[in-house]
Image (cartoon, helix red, strand yellow):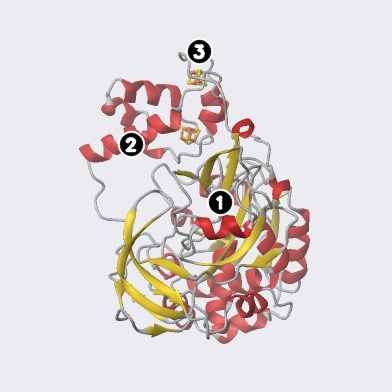
């Protein structure tokens, strides 16, 4: 493989505005991934992706192996779901997702006779023998079929079915594949550990994904606060055409628009997608899952979850069967400290506060964060000071105070004209606001009203 045809990097590794919150990666950043033992039961949600609910494929009371097909994809935008542990299938039930939504699920009660597959899967994923040449032995169609069959979705939280994203579209061809290793949310360390401990899988997965979508350039973007991950990826990518791009540590560098600006100096038009500038973006965890699916034909059933923050007795990064409860993971980390005040699924900027630990890990859950009194922002809300700090912080050049003012006065027409639907809910404005105004909450509520008035037509 040659690197001579690859054009030089175009971006400067930066984007304008944004914020620098404390990264707080020290809680779990140095903890190597450990395999979580199978729980007594899992509640596997039938909706772990954007699109239609998967359709149950097995009968209650039947036995299923780990990795067996539990539910089929339904429709064009959907993903199949597989059993994350071996055991007895229960009756259809409901479970709670991290965003508090109640969805259809199926319980699997562990078969004590069947060996746990977690250690075997982690050994494969973290092996040092990943061969980059393997990607070229598959056609684009074969790779897409395996990605689809494995139920892979965007593991950075978007949960969009990956085969749909990578399927070649002659109207909008993909030229560049950008792999997101930024993990810019404070506290979270799952992706960083994956890059350090399973760099070979990330590189091979990226090569497979590029072959599937037809990209002729691959860049893995990693923030410069992860030197060990950068070194591991560079070693794994040696003699391949995968480029490792060090970018500035700044929130929200992992946003698609910010990353594409930083790496390629391209601007996605308002309301547009990365494909509009010829780029497909996938997360590093998704890339590793692609490698497991294409090379080993393993479905996506476990993922790394950071259980972290000052409220956790022993923070860890756990290789976890999907469908495990948050309570099971937290117990494996010694439990919560008494001073814990808030549990968040994901990071503190864009995650969801969960009311209890009776919530299920899905393919898109990268972290469980426990915050204590001193780590939760304090202070009440005061009137807007018109200081403009929210505008200075917004990476999308919006005027958050103006959007929120329109929303508060129920002038949703004005909110729309002020580009409320462009907001990515990154939280930079609220972080910067000295008046403690919950700007993102107002924006979310305003968006719902705007969409009610003019629901989006089809699409994603
Ligand atoms: S207005 Fe939206 S995009 Fe801009 S900083 Fe606030 S949350 Fe982020
Ligand atoms: S940062 Fe807060 S106080 Fe300042 S203008 Fe924006 S909303 Fe008002």
Helix, strand or loop for disc 2: helix
Q: Residue at x 40, y 39 (%)?
A: 422
Taking 8 as reference, is 377 left or right?
left
Distance between the Cα atoms at labels 1 and 3? Answer: 34 Å
Q: Is mark 3 within 8 Å of ligand 2?
A: yes
Residue located at (62% from left, 46% from top)? 184
Secondary-structure class at tag 3: loop
* Dot 1 alpha-carbon crowd within 10 angstroms: few under 14, some 14 to 19, many 20 or more: many
Residue 441, which numbered label? none
Q: Secondary structure at mark 1?
A: strand
The image position of residue 296, as x and y in percent, is: 57, 83
Where does the image place residue 353, in percent across and percent down from the top left?
A: 47, 42
Residue 241, x across and y down, in percent: 68, 70
Q: CA distance from mark 2 to mark 3?
A: 24 Å
Tag shown at residue 368: 1
Ligand 1 lies under 8 Å from the Cβ of mark 2: no
- Name the N-terminal-most of marks 2 and 3: 3
Residue 247 in sight here:
no
Mark 3 packing: few (<14 Cα in 10 Å), some, or many (20+)?
A: few
């Amino acid at each position: 493989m040659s690197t001579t045809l690859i054009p030089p990097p175009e971006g400067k590794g930066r984007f304008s505005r944004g914020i620098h919150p404390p990264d707080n990666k020290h809680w779990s950043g140095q903890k190597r991934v450990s395999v979580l033992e199978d729980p007594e039961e899992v509640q596997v949600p039938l909706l772990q992706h954007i699109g239609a609910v998967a359709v149950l494929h097995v009968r209650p009371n039947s036995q299923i192996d780990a990795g067996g097909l539990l539910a089929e994809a339904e429709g064009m935008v959907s993903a199949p779901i597989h059993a994350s542990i071996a055991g007895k299938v229960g009756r259809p039930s409901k479970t709670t997702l991290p965003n508090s939504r109640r969805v259809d699920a199926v319980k699997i009660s562990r078969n004590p006779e069947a060996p746990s597959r977690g250690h075997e899967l982690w050994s494969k994923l973290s092996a040092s023998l990943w061969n980059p040449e393997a990607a070229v032995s598959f056609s684009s169609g074969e790779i897409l079929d395996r990605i689809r069959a494995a139920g892979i979705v965007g593991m950075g939280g978007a949960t969009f079915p990956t085969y749909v994203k990578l399927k070649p579209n002659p109207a909008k061809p993909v030229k560049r594949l950008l792999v997101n290793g930024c993990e810019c949310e404070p506290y979270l360390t799952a992706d960083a550990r994956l890059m350090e401990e399973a760099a070979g899988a990330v590189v091979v997965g990226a090569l497979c994904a590029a072959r599937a979508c037809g990209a002729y350039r691959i860049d893995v973007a990693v923030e410069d606060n992860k030197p060990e991950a950068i070194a591991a990826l560079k070693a794994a990518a040696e003699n391949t055409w995968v480029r490792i791009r060090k970018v500035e540590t700044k929130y929200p560098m992992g946003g698609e628009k910010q990353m594409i600006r930083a790496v390629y100096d391209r601007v996605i038009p308002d309301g547009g997608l990365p494909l509009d500038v010829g780029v497909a973006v996938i997360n590093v965890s998704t890339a590793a899952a692609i490698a497991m699916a294409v090379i080993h034909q393993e479905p996506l059933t476990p993922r790394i979850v950071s259980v972290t923050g000052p409220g956790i007795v022993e923070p860890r990064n756990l290789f976890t069967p999907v469908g495990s409860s948050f309570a099971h993971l937290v117990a494996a980390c010694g439990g919560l400290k008494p001073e814990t005040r808030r549990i968040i699924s994901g990071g503190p900027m864009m995650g969801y506060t969960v009311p209890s630990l009776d919530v299920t890990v899905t393919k898109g859950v990268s972290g469980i964060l426990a915050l204590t009194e001193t780590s939760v922002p304090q202070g009440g809300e005061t009137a807007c000071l018109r200081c403009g700090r929210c505008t200075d912080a917004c990476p999308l050049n919006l005027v958050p105070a103006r959007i929120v003012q329109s929303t508060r006065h129920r002038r949703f027409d004005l909110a729309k004209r002020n580009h409320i639907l462009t907001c990515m809910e990154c939280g930079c404005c609220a972080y910067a606001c000295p008046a403690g105004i919950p700007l993102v909450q107002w924006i979310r509520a305003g968006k719902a009203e705007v969409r009610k008035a003019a629901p989006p037509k089809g699409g994603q």
